[in-house]
Image (tube, rainbow, N blue to C red):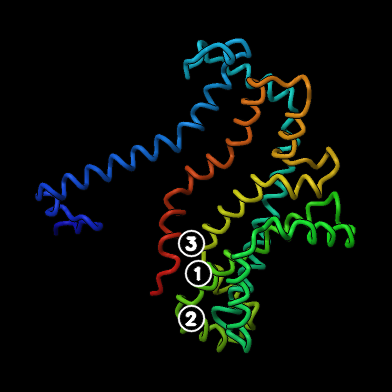
């Protein structure tokens, strides 16, 4: 039997038409151009990290004269960034757990349980998307101080675990789940929490993966809240350490470039590993089956 080919908007026999081929060529060219513009800053920073200060200031070529990886090792030792990597890992791990559990529970209530007043809550969540995140920094910081949670990772976990967009994604996905499975689990004697953790959450691995990636990126790249909360040097995340490092008088531009490369590595690796799952599930999350 001949295998069925999966086709998109443009099918194979559409390419026999000259106007379609020309349009398709323009689309490919535009995609290549956008990709070059998106990747060029990252490539430039990585290549600039191989240059010493003299070459960095005088050379106009994007390529370094020598690819010396030892210079990155020396910058790693100078930064002492291993401890900061561990702090960022702690912050990211707790943030992902809170993002999945807390937002998932609220999405479960709005998408499956739908108690009285859930429509109002859902509208309030949508309205909160219109508010800039920065306006909540002052009251959030004051509450952290009143609760005596300063210099702790707990406020970071809880703040990253409360996200209106994650709630909306969870709600839309939960609404597409088959009600028969949920009802069968209730007949078998599961309470609401058991239904969520044993039935709904395992069925929601695609959207959980998407939200986990978003949470990792947000927790890793955030600077302001960790800078305000984690006052001590022992708990500084990578982004906070980069800021402190940049204020030191002994730091050169080439050294700072290598420090920036260290901060970019984990998100880039994570994206390349899960890029297919991320793009596919982000597109299909709002489609109800």
Residue 206: assigned label: 3
CA–CA distance in space, label 3 to label 2? 18 Å
| Left or right of 262 in this view: 273 | left
Callout 3: 10 Å neighbours few (<14), some, many (20+)? some
User: Which residue is pictured at 50% across the width and 45% down the height?
Assistant: 271
Q: Cβ–Cβ below 8 Å for labels 1 and 3?
A: no
- In the image shown, does 64 or 235 lie closer to the viewer? 64
In front: 251, or 209?
Answer: 251
Asked whether, in this view, residue 255 is left or right of residue 30, the answer is right
Residue at image mark 1: 203
The span from disc 2 to disc 1 (Cα, nearest Å) is: 10 Å
Q: CA distance from mark 1 to mark 3?
A: 8 Å
Which numbered mark, 3 or 2, is in the foreground of this view?
3
The answer to which of marks 3 and 2 sits earlier in the sequence is 2
Residue under the image location 62 percent in, 63 percent down:
100
Q: Residues within 10 Å of mark 2 (few under 14, many from 20)?
A: few
Query: Front-most of 52 and 127?
Result: 127
Q: Is residue 106 left or right of residue 229?
A: left
Q: Are marks 2 and 1 in contact (CB under 8 Å)?
A: yes
* Pair 1/3: label in front: 3
> What kind of element bears circle 2?
helix
Residue 116 vs 239, above or below: the answer is: below
Pointer 2 residue: 181
């Amino acid at each position: 039997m001949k295998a069925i080919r999966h086709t998109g908007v443009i099918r194979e026999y559409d390419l026999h038409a000259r106007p379609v081929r020309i349009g398709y060529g323009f689309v490919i060219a535009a995609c290549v151009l956008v990709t070059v513009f998106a990747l060029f800053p990252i490539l430039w920073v990585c290549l600039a990290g191989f240059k010493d200060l003299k070459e960095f200031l005088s050379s106009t070529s994007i390529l370094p004269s020598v690819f010396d990886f030892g210079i990155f090792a020396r910058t790693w030792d100078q930064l002492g960034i291993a401890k900061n990597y561990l702090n960022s890992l702690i912050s990211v791990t707790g943030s992902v757990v809170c993002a999945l559990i807390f937002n998932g529970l609220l999405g479960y209530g709005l998408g499956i349980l739908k108690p009285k007043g859930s429509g109002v809550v859902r509208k309030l969540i949508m309205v909160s998307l219109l508010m800039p995140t920065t306006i909540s920094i002052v009251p959030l910081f004051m509450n952290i101080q009143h609760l005596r949670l300063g210099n702790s990772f707990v406020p970071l976990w809880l703040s990253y675990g409360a996200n209106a967009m994650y709630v909306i994604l969870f709600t839309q996905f939960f609404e597409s789940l088959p009600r028969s499975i949920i009802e069968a689990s209730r007949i078998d004697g599961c309470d609401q929490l058991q239904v969520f953790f044993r039935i709904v959450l395992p069925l929601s691995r695609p959207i959980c993966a998407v939200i986990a990636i978003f949470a990792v990126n947000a927790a890793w790249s955030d600077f302001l809240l960790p800078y305000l909360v984690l006052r001590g040097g022992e708990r500084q995340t990578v982004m906070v350490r980069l800021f402190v490092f940049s204020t030191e008088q002994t730091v050169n531009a080439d050294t700072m470039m290598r420090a920036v490369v260290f901060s970019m590595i984990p998100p880039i690796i994570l994206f390349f590993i899960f890029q297919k799952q991320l793009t596919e599930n982000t597109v299909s999350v709002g489609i109800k089956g």
